[in-house]
Image (tube, rainbow, N blue to C red):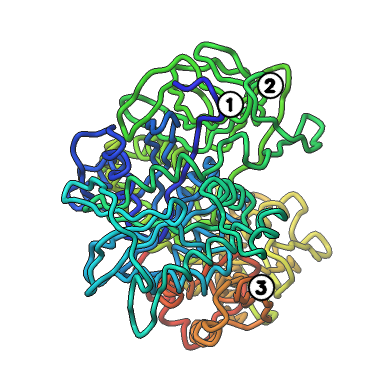
Amino acid sequence: MTKDTATIKNIALAGHNGSGKTSLAEALLYKAGVIERLGKTAEGNTICDYDPEEIKRKVTINTSVANFVTDSIKINLIDTPGLFDFEGSMREGITAAGTVMITVSGKSGVKVGTKKAYSYAEKLNKSRVFVITKLDDPNANFYNTLTELKTVFGPTVCPVVVPVIQNSEIVSYINLIEMKAYKYDDKGNAVETEMPNGDIANNDKMDYRLDGLIQAVSEAVAETDDELMEKFFEGVAFTQKELTDGIHKGINSGKITPVLCASSTTLAGIDMILKEMSLLLPSPLEVAKPVASDINGDPVEIECSVSEPLSAFVFKTIVDPFVGKMSFIKVYSGKITSGKEIINAVTGTTEKVGKLYNMCGKKQEEVTEAMAGDIVIATKMNINTSDTLCDPSRVVKFDHIEYPRACYSMAVKSKAQGDESKISSGITKLLEEDPTLTYVQDPSTLEQVLSGLGDQHLEIAVAKLKGKFGADVILTVPKIAYKETIRKKVKVEGKHKKQSGGHGQYGHVWMEFEPTVGEDLVFEERVFGGAVPKNYFPAVEKGILDSMKKGVLAGCPVVGLKAILVDGSYHPVDSSELAFKTAASIAYKEGLKQADPVLLEPIGNLSVRVEDDKTGDVMGELNKRRGRMLGMNPLENGMTEILADVPMREMHDFTTYLKQTTRGMGDFTYDFVRYEQLPANLVSEVIVALNNSNE
């Protein structure tokens, strides 16, 4: 446990799925001496991917923390998922980090996940580093990837470690700060070798010269300081310390995004990444001070000092069926101590700090406290993700993590009767773990609906529900909440007459039905001369209200109905409230059949954000989905917002379509706004489907 905030580095690994984040974490842990055996994602035995679903699927789906010490620096390494369905978890990891290390496959180059990780890190003002991975692959191309990074992310991209390539093979790596070259043996151990002269790579008819790369680094460093800029113009070479300090300063200010490279399989270059972590990346003392809100809602900067009152942020929650709730906490100021009472600024409650742990994957090491700048895990505390923990002497609150909205929904049904409480309890715990999931009962269809960021997201949620909490469910496409209404005015009679010994039943009404604005029933009575006594008016209204739960076309609720009681008759002995309620129901059924009934479908407002060159494809697709275009708005970074009204019936698989078309770059929000008449060509299809679902 470190006692000095200056010796802490919080580094998130982010990037496109399959770009080598978890493999890089494994290689760093192995090279730092934390683990004795180099695990592999394909074999399901890495430190950071320890969840049963991660092992089974061989892909990261949860953010995990692994800490280790190198060069007397404590590194909290945060491995985040690259799958778009788990973007919320990536955002949690980046929120807690000081630096985001973005992995880019040397084989496949810049992908959508690269851009998303960079964009979110930039939004939160985090320093950024690129690591070009998988250089052991024969199809990897470091220099093409470097050029692509410069093209996409601009002039801040600066090479720091580069490979020397001869005959299409990497023969050594050059550290452009040290100006030294290293060869690696089959165990990943570095041996200094001679620096090459002139060209260090010839690729796709483009020469990469060492002096050009040195010039690029020097220019980037000169941008960070006026004195260095003057020295650069005078043609004086920078010292190693000036390069190190300049890049360190440039990373922290966002003026430099260094590029490193390595192979996690052969371990070549891993030692240099560890070295640059210690030398170049900022500590919590150097990053921008986080801003919180005080009890009056006014902003306050939080000083990262152990002498300040405690302020800490819960950036992730795991609910383990055996251990209980585990809360991942970033300490911004002061220190958090096991057993101490603190304030949860979000709920206002007093909490007692549980046991505290350092984590390395699933391996736990108990500690008594954690200081400003550090990351720690607390167990069995009644706190949730995005909660702020404070010392009672200074209550402040940090902004909640901004999560992507759930956009893909499925209805949840139990496989076995009696599992409902188990399902409810299990999903409640899943929601604590993953705030991008939602679980609600549709008030119209009464279905329990689970929503997330995609089909894989919900599939894994269901697998966790069964594996962790023993609740077995199936997912089905949610029902659409259709409604019915009428389009013309009619006048009908409803008579209920029954005689079966003793008192009979007699109710007789004449009703007018007509369309009206709004969903609720509008009931009026225009009876003259006491044809229907006043005491039966409520029974007539109740009969209509009860009947409106089912329409005459497909049994859907009826809206926009005005019912007027205009006449009728009664029997002094046989009439009753029940008889008039039944008579009203009879009039309702007959009246709606004559009043030109129609089906209504829900319409939502869609806001979809896509890259400029995809707008034509998406607009064409929305036209196929009966969308009504409302407009387009240009956004930053080459994106466009398309606004449209689209029927809910057409939206179920739009998430999948958009991911495939934009390769994950597009996103959307969709909100219900109103009901509209269902087109005539779809009515019979919908009626058949609704009747089948009700059987």
Query: Badge 1: how crowded within 10 Å, few (<14), some, or many (20+)?
Result: many
- On residue 308, the disc is 2
Q: Residue at x 59, y 54 (%)?
A: 579
Tell me how far mark 3 sits from mark 1, CA to CA.
38 Å
Q: Nearer the viewer, residue 513 or 268?
A: 268
Residue identified by numbered label 3: 635
Q: Nearer the viewer, mark 3 or mark 1?
A: 1
Tell me how far mark 2 sits from mark 1, CA to CA.
9 Å
Name the spot of residue 82 as percent of width and height, x first: 39, 56
Question: In the picture provided, is 55 more to the left or to the right than 329?
Answer: left
Asked whether the beta carbons under mark 3 and mark 1 sit within 8 Å of each other, the answer is no
Name the spot of residue 119 as percent of width and height, x first: 56, 60
Residue 695 visible in the displayed image: no
Q: Amino acid at mark 3?
A: Leu
**In this view, 679 is above or below 259:** below
Q: Nearer the viewer, mark 3 or mark 2?
A: 2
Q: Residue at x 18, y 38 (%)?
A: 37
Asked whether the beta carbons under mark 2 and mark 1 sit within 8 Å of each other, the answer is yes
Q: Amino acid at mark 2?
A: Glu
Name the spot of residue 234 as percent of width and height, x first: 66, 63
* Quadrant into which the N terminus falls: top left
Asked whether the beta carbons under mark 3 and mark 2 sit within 8 Å of each other, the answer is no
- Residue 528 appears in which quarter of the rendering? bottom right
Residue identified by numbered label 1: 372
- On residue 561, the disc is none
**In this view, 346 is above or below 52:** above
Tell me how far mark 3 sits from mark 2, CA to CA.
41 Å
Mark 3 or mark 1: whose residue is earlier in sequence: 1
